[in-house]
Amino acid sequence: MTPYFHGVFTVNTMDIIISNLKFLNEIGLWEILSCLFVLFGAITAWWYFFFRKRYIHRLNVHTNKSRREGINYTSLINIEFRNFTGKSVVICNPYFKYKDLKRDRAGHRDSYSDRTEVKFLGMESKSLTEVDIFLRHKDRTETWVPVDPSHADEEIQLALDKKRVGVLYFDCIWIEERPQIDRVRYSI
């Protein structure tokens, strides 16, 4: 039998393609491909909902240590947020988890998750009262987290230099026509 042309493929070529597709169907390739598509979708959804950024360009976070006299919180890690992104942002849902340094026992935390509360400076007072803060372009705000006062200054500075004090978690809501949320994980 001489092959004749049917479009680009010859009839013999079409028979080979059809037989190969039947073979792939028999070994279950289509089920494997559909499983891979579902797996890819699940990984993409996990990445979208649970991945936290480690850095937002031009949302600067500056840290330093300080000691103060008083009843509570004598050893602090000061955290300053400066917004130079060109957009307004709401920083919300902040909490802190310690790594190398111990927390101050007087610090407020959730006992179950061991998350330390983080609040921002209020507009009316010099105390930390706000749980969310609105920052316009070129605005700044401050907060701090207490560390155990038994740590030496050199130990605190070494942990700051190596970014081993802990991790600050927060969400950024960008104020735009269509607001966007970024979940941020910042090592301090």
Image: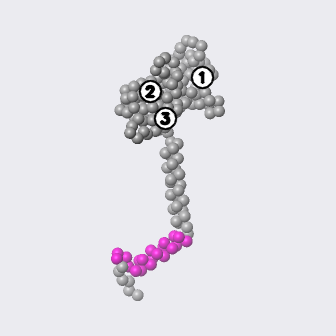
Q: In this figure, which residue is indicated by the disc labeled 3? A: 171
Percent of width and height locating residue 125 = 49, 17
Q: Say which residue appears at 44% left-offset and 27% top-offset.
A: 81
Q: Position of residue 102 (x, y in %)?
A: 60, 25
Sequence-earlier tag: 1 or 2: 2
Outermost residue on the bottom side: it is 1
* Local SS, label 3: strand
How dense is the environment of label 1, judged by Cα within 10 Å: few (below 14), some, or many (20 and up)?
A: some
Q: Position of residue 105 (x, y in %)?
A: 63, 22
Q: Which residue is mark 1?
A: 107
The quadrant in which the N terminus is found is bottom left
Which secondary structure type mostly characterizes the magenta part of the structure?
A: helix
Between disc 3 and disc 2, whose residue precedes? 2
Return the mark for residue 81: 2
Q: Which segment did they paint magenta? A: 7-26
Does the stretch in magenta take in 139? Answer: no
154 lies left or right of 138: right
Q: Residue at x 60, y 18 (%)?
A: 150
Answer whether residue 46 is visible to the viewer in this image. Answer: yes
Q: Using the numbered discs, state the Cα–Cα distance from disc 3 to disc 2 in whole angstroms.
A: 13 Å
Q: Are marks 3 and 2 in contact (CB under 8 Å)?
A: no
Q: Amino acid at mark 3?
A: Asp
Q: Secondary structure at mark 1?
A: loop
* Residue for point 59% across, 30% down: 115
**Helix or strand or loop: what does disc 2 sit on?**
strand
Residue type beneath disc 1: Gly
